[in-house]
Image: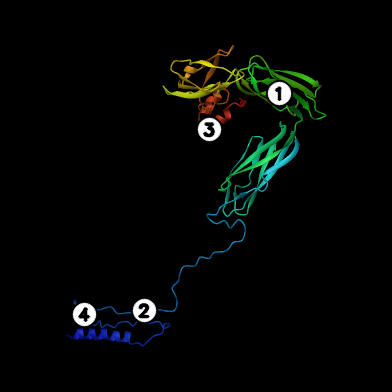
Amino acid sequence: MSKWRMLLVCCFLGSLVVLGCGGQKTPTQPVVEQPTVVDTSKPPKEEEVIAPPVVEVVPTDTPEPTADPVVTEEVDAPGEQAVQGGVPKAVVDEPVFNYGKRNDDESVTHHFVLRNDGTGILKIENVRASCGCTTTDLPTDTLAPGEEVKIGAVTNLRGRQGKQVKTVTVFTNDPENQTIQLRLEGEVQASIMIEPTAVNFGRIDDNEPREAKVTVKSTKDDLTFAIISAELTDMDFVEHDITEVEEGRAFDIVIKTTGELPVGNHNSRMIIRTDARERAVLWLPISMQVVGALQVMPPVINIRYSEEPGDVEQQQLRITPGRVAEFEILDVVAPIDSIETTLMSTGDNAYTLRLSNMPRNDDLEGKSVVLRTNIPGHEEIDIPFNIYKPRRPTQQRLPNIAPALRERMKRPPTGVEDVADAPTTQTNTQE
């Protein structure tokens, strides 16, 4: 072994003795690394490799740092206990408010209290009134558990008379109570009263005249009025007479049918106008069911119009006694040859009529199916067709203003000058 190799081996063994024989160490005493001493006066040969020193790692008592633990704080305040995935519960202790008797020149205001008795967030998705005479107010649409909100409702009694019921529907995300109905109810004393509030002649024969009397009177000592007009549309077979019973305070309106009445159900409203600011317009519903010699249900054959060539429809009608108890149907005549008719007896004086292959176009407009019977004076009974066409959405019409301004409204604005130069035009939006 050469002299240089012997020197390197001795240095290596010496370093091992220094590091390994330093005695037992306690955990609190750090180990000081001893450097390896190498004689560099002469460089080693190229094939010689110097081994790296071995370092002993001694653990200490200090633990390695860990992530901070999650601290959950208990919250007792209501509204902060809503757990994700909790279930809301909408509660209204008093959903009905009765305001008693009021005059027709008043408005009724009330606040319904809605509370969340659940464990999740309650969302109020919508609040909808039953008619335009009632408005609502909702300060907030989100309620935490234990919170409540006052839902305001205002109903205008102007033009009302008698018992009134107005509803407000509340839509929520409560899975067991998605809709809550609130009610405002009471009785309205009208300044000008109409009695009765509706005329229903009921079921009457087509040759049976009927009449009814309606009284319009003031309920206030200092209120006088006059009836300007009374109009009834869609019932040209009904007439009326107006008589002043007490000067400026009471009038009688006699309503009566005239001539042979058209068979079917009839519903309309008489519009009564007065010169009183308190109640300028009164509405009187009028209804009746007119029965002919036979009762045909439905009394009119309604067909939905179709633009598709060849579309046809099938319907079934029931024929029973009207004011004639016993009858016989001898024949059925269709207005066009393509319609197939099937008449079936379903008992004494009762028939079912099936109509097939009816075209869904204008071919049947103004036409009728004819029943030929053995009833004197009603040997032929017509069942009319009605072709109805669905309404199509139309483009919004521009206001009825000057053509120059209409053209300008169609164009996008080009600057302030367009607005400034536009003529001022007042339009009437009532149709």
Residue on which the image places disc 3: 415
Of badges 2 and 3, nearer the viewer stands 2
Q: Residue at x 43, y 73 (%)?
A: 64
Residue on which the image places disc 2: 57
Of badges 1 and 3, nearer the viewer stands 1
Of badges 1 and 2, nearer the viewer stands 1
Residue 158 lies left or right of residue 363; in this view the side is: right
Distance between mark 4 and mark 1 Cα atoms: 127 Å
Distance between mark 1 and mark 2 Cα atoms: 108 Å
Percent position of residue 262, x then y: 61, 17
Q: Amino acid at mark 3?
A: Gly
Q: Are marks 3 and 4 in contact (CB under 8 Å)?
A: no
Residue on which the image places disc 1: 272
Q: Earlier in the sequence, mark 1 or mark 3?
A: 1
Q: Amino acid at mark 2?
A: Val
Which image quadrant is residue 204 in? top right
Foreground residue among 393 and 246: 246
Q: Amino acid at mark 1?
A: Ile
Q: Residue reaching furthest top?
A: 377
Percent position of residue 49, x then y: 22, 77
Percent position of residue 406, x then y: 54, 25
Residue on which the image places disc 4: 44
